[in-house]
Image: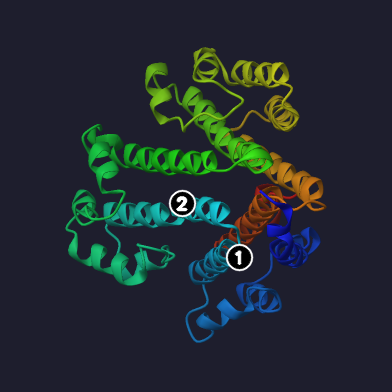
């Protein structure tokens, strides 16, 4: 990809990177009341979307929806100003929000909550816009019936296949696994259309995201003593670092620490430094505090650090690395704000909220 095609886009992304909320400002929101958080966020790039809920009930769900809308808008603006092949990759990545809406509808229908309550947890996007989501929720009798109402979208065959491969007790987990696998396979296909440095960088940035999810699936499954032959069915497509055999080796270990060590040894043999940093931190965290929730936070924190390193690494150049790393950093900003909002609404102690934030050291 010729560098000049990125000239305008790089300037735009650098400008948006400078608008990210500083870690100190995010920490300062911990323990504050909802109206104070709303007021402070109104002075940030979220201000336009926040005006939509000015006259509505001020709660965590409505503000979270605004944060997600802003993130999607940011992705779409960058996508629309990208070269054609990058635009295709970003469009594919945004499908994650469509399947998130499908998951939200299924969970809400399964839980038997009202349509108005359910819509608080849905961020209309693409084929799953507000009208479509409401229509499905109102007309489907149950969670299984939701799938019939989605037969005309690209996820229809995936949902039907998932439904034919489940036990009643785990139907939602299987459906979500199939949807995740489908979208990440599509992302890998989109990466395959790139060339040269762009392809290599995209494989690195998105590969580490996918592998971090696989790592958490493996560790959680080991902790829950899920049968080993079943775990591999939940895994997402593998990246350039871990082969299917190497992931199976990590699954076959007898405990979480051995599994992390197995993956770390593979990362060292591949000389994959970002993976080594991530898995070393994960191993240290587990030895200090052997908790799945702490491991998940540590894994996300490592991903943020990786994205921040990549922002520094790729900012001087015109390539896809800056775009993907920025979108990851922006996503963690949204994630942290959602944690703070839920903590404020639930009167969670500030020290507990701080433990859940994903911030660089």
Q: Could you tell me which residue is drawn at 54 percent across and 56 percent down?
A: 84
Q: Is residue 191 left or right of residue 20?
A: left
Q: Could you tell me which residue is drawn at 71 percent across and 62 percent down?
A: 13
Report helix, strand or loop for mark 1. Answer: loop
Q: Residue furthest bottom?
A: 55
Q: Which residue is mark 1?
A: 81
Count the marks.
2
**Around disc 1, counting alpha carbons within 10 Å, would you say few (fewer than 14), some (14 to 19), or many (20 or more)?**
some
Residue 196: x and y in percent read 65, 39
Q: Which residue is mark 2?
A: 96
Residue 281: x and y in percent read 73, 31
| Residues under numbered marks 2 and 1 in contact, where contact means CB atoms less than 8 Å apart | no
**Around disc 2, counting alpha carbons within 10 Å, would you say few (fewer than 14), some (14 to 19), or many (20 or more)?**
some
Q: Is residue 197 left or right of residue 130?
A: right
Q: Looking at the picture, does residue 201 appear above or below residue 68?
A: above
Residue 360: x and y in percent read 77, 47
Q: Nearer the viewer, residue 137 or 95?
A: 95
Q: Looking at the picture, does residue 249 appear above or below residue 267?
A: above
Q: Nearer the viewer, residue 183 or 79?
A: 79
Colour setup of the view: rainbow
In the picture, the quarter occupied by the C terminus is top right
Q: Is residue 176 left or right of residue 163?
A: right
Q: Could you tell me which residue is drawn at 78 percent across and 62 percent down?
A: 22
Rendering quarter of residue 257: top right
Please identify, in this view, whether the residue under mark 2 or under mark 1 is nearer the observer.
Answer: 1
Q: Looking at the picture, does residue 162 appear above or below residue 219?
A: below
Upstream in sequence: badge 2 or badge 1: 1
CA separation in Å, label 2 and label 1: 20 Å
Q: Which mark is residue 117?
A: none
Residue 310: x and y in percent read 75, 45
Report helix, strand or loop for mark 2. Answer: helix
């Amino acid at each position: 990809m010729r560098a000049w095609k990125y000239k305008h886009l790089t300037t735009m992304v650098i400008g948006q990177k400078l608008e990210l909320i500083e870690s100190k400002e995010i920490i300062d929101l911990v323990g504050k009341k909802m109206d104070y958080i709303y007021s402070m966020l109104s002075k940030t790039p979220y201000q336009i979307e926040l005006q939509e809920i000015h006259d509505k009930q001020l709660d965590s769900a409505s503000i979270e929806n605004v944060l997600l809308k802003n993130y999607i808008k940011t992705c779409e603006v960058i996508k629309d100003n990208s070269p054609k092949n990058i635009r295709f990759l970003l469009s594919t990545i945004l499908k994650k929000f469509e399947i998130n809406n499908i998951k939200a509808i299924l969970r809400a229908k399964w839980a038997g909550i009202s349509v108005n309550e359910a819509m608080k947890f849905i961020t209309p996007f693409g084929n799953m816009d507000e009208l479509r989501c409401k229509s499905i929720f109102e007309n489907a009798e149950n969670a299984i019936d939701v799938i019939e109402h989605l037969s005309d979208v690209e996820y229809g065959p995936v949902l039907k296949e998932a439904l034919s491969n489940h036990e009643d007790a785990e139907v939602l987990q299987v459906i979500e696994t199939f949807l995740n696998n489908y979208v990440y396979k599509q992302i890998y296909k989109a990466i395959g259309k790139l060339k040269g440095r762009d392809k290599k960088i995209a494989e690195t940035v998105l590969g580490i995201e996918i592998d971090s999810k696989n790592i958490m699936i493996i560790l959680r499954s080991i902790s829950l003593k899920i049968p080993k032959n079943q775990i591999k069915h939940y895994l997402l497509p593998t990246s350039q670092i871990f082969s299917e055999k190497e992931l199976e080796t990590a699954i076959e270990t007898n405990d979480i620490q051995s599994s992390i060590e197995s993956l770390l040894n593979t990362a060292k043999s591949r000389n994959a430094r970002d993976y080594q940093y991530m898995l070393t931190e994960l191993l240290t965290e587990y030895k200090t505090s052997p908790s799945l929730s702490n491991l998940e936070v540590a894994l996300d924190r490592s991903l943020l650090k990786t994205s921040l390193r990549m922002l520094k690494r790729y900012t001087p150049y015109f390539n896809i690395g800056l775009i993907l790393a920025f979108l990851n950093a922006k996503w963690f900003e949204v994630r942290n704000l959602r944690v703070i909002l839920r903590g404020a609404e639930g009167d969670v102690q500030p020290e507990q909220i701080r433990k859940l934030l994903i911030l660089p050291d």
